[in-house]
Amino acid sequence: MTNHEVGVGLLGLGTIAGQVARVLQERSTALGEQTGVTPVLRKIKVLPVDMNKPQAQAMAPGLMTTDEAEFWNTPGLDIIIELIGGEHPALEYQEKALRMGKHVVTANKEVIAKHGVALMKLAAEGGLHLGYEAAVGGGIPLIAPFQRDLVANKINGIYAIINGTTNYILSRMAQENVDFTEALAQAQKLGYAEPNPRNDIEGIDAAYKLAILATLAFRSEVKPSQVFHEGISRLTARDFQYARELGYGIKLLAIAKQANSQIEARVHPVFLPCDSFLAKVNGVFNAVLVDGDLTGQVTFTGKGAGPLPTSSAIVADVIRIAKDIAAGAAVPPAFEARNKRDVIAMEDIITRYYIRMSIADQPGVLAQIARTLGDHNISIASAIQKQADASTFAAEIVIMTHPAREKEMQAAFSEFKTLPAVKEISNFVRVEE
Ligand code: HSE
């Protein structure tokens, strides 16, 4: 069997890149024997501050450079792996590599979510690959199945837990009855949450990943700015208690649906029936449920982050590209966003709601609340009243609604605030069945 060497250049040497470098070096021969292509790591571009990191100390000194020109001029770089993260200069590095005729592999969800369609066009113009399997769901195969295995389907919807940090926090809140701040502190202590966890807890990371999956699934560009996102920080132990009582779990769900040539794309906490598959996915695990018209529901689950699973996806992209290089095969565009679908504004989404309010415990208050909801075409499915506090004459009421339009729900909330008997709208969470 002939063996073809393919040169690889690596941009970045953080935890993920360090692991990728290790796999490429340690498994190069074995991969060559098994696949017929041997990836050879030829140069790593690092920042001066990275030179002292343990992963840098483990590399042969000649392999690393802090000099951009030296990196780009290294002979025999066929594939560039960009793992510096963030939008800039990662985007410019990927563009430069493609313009120089080099294939690109990346785990950068922000760049792919914001610029993926344009980058794929650039890659296709040059007959090059852009591999980004690692950008969503770490080691879980997701991009390739959408590009290949599910291609005969009309995808009706995607329902996904695609942020491990928030799933860990919500699992702790559900299992240990702790509040958000305490669960976040635990996640940070264990190194799951970043020191600045905003992108995770505000749903921004999940929105990037959903934009990537929805674009692929519906073959229509969905920009991250079109994905509504709301985080998990306002959830309390009390909401979890009520969810349990009502037969639900709470998850940060990324939802993308296609109906009547329109796309719905949103990330927010949801009540999910506790016996549903997604409600049972706990800890840092990710899970993606795809509803195809031919396949029905297909689920993918596994570790959605971390150096080992992410390196699996990155090296698989490298090998797939290396095989095409070795075969001298022309590269057909992996994907084109041929459809032009509108993304529905959040205010027009229709869903059910859980609402928790503190109200005055006096005659006629429930009637006022029901009237306000009724005025906005919102029908109550069930209501429970708890905990009348004798000292403040306050009671807590929890309402589950039938499907209602977001715009109407928000208008009802505004009106509740004007009612003297409503002391506080403590929380609301959308409900998915
Ligand atoms: N911060 C992400 C998560 C991992 O918690 O899932 C990288 O995508």
Image (spheres, rainbow, N blue to C red):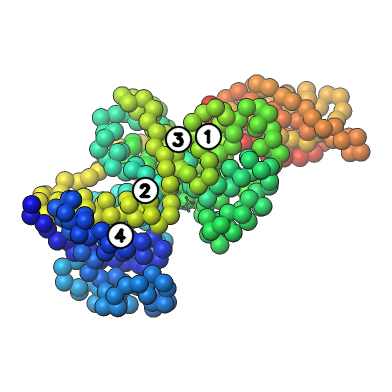
Q: Which residue is mark 1?
A: 280
Discs 4/3, front: 4
Question: Dot 4, how many residues are within 10 Å of its Cα: few (below 14), some (14-19), or many (20+)?
Answer: some
Q: Are marks 1 and 2 in contact (CB under 8 Å)?
A: no
* Amino acid of disc 3: Tyr
Quarter of the view holding residue 189 = bottom right
- Residue 345 visible in the picture: no
SS at circle 1:
helix
Residue 258 higher or lower than 201, as above or below: above
For the residues labelled 3 and 2, the Cα–Cα distance comes to 18 Å
Q: Pick whichever of labels 3 and 1 is earlier in the sequence.
A: 3
Q: Pick whichever of labels 2 and 4 is earlier in the sequence.
A: 4
Q: Which residue is mark 4?
A: 23
Residue 190 higher or lower than 346, as above or below: below
Q: Which numbered disc covers residue 159?
A: 3
Residue 418 shown left or right of residue 95 in the figure:
right
Residue 96 shown left or right of residue 403 in the figure:
left
Question: Dot 2, how many residues are within 10 Å of its Cα: few (below 14), some (14-19), or many (20+)?
Answer: many
Discs 3/2, front: 2
* Amino acid of disc 1: Lys
- Residue 272 visible in the picture: yes
- Indicate if the residue with disc 3 has its beta carbon within 8 Å of ligand 1: no
The residue lying furthest to the right in this view is: 391
For the residues labelled 1 and 4, the Cα–Cα distance comes to 32 Å
Q: Which residue is mark 2?
A: 139
SS at circle 2:
loop
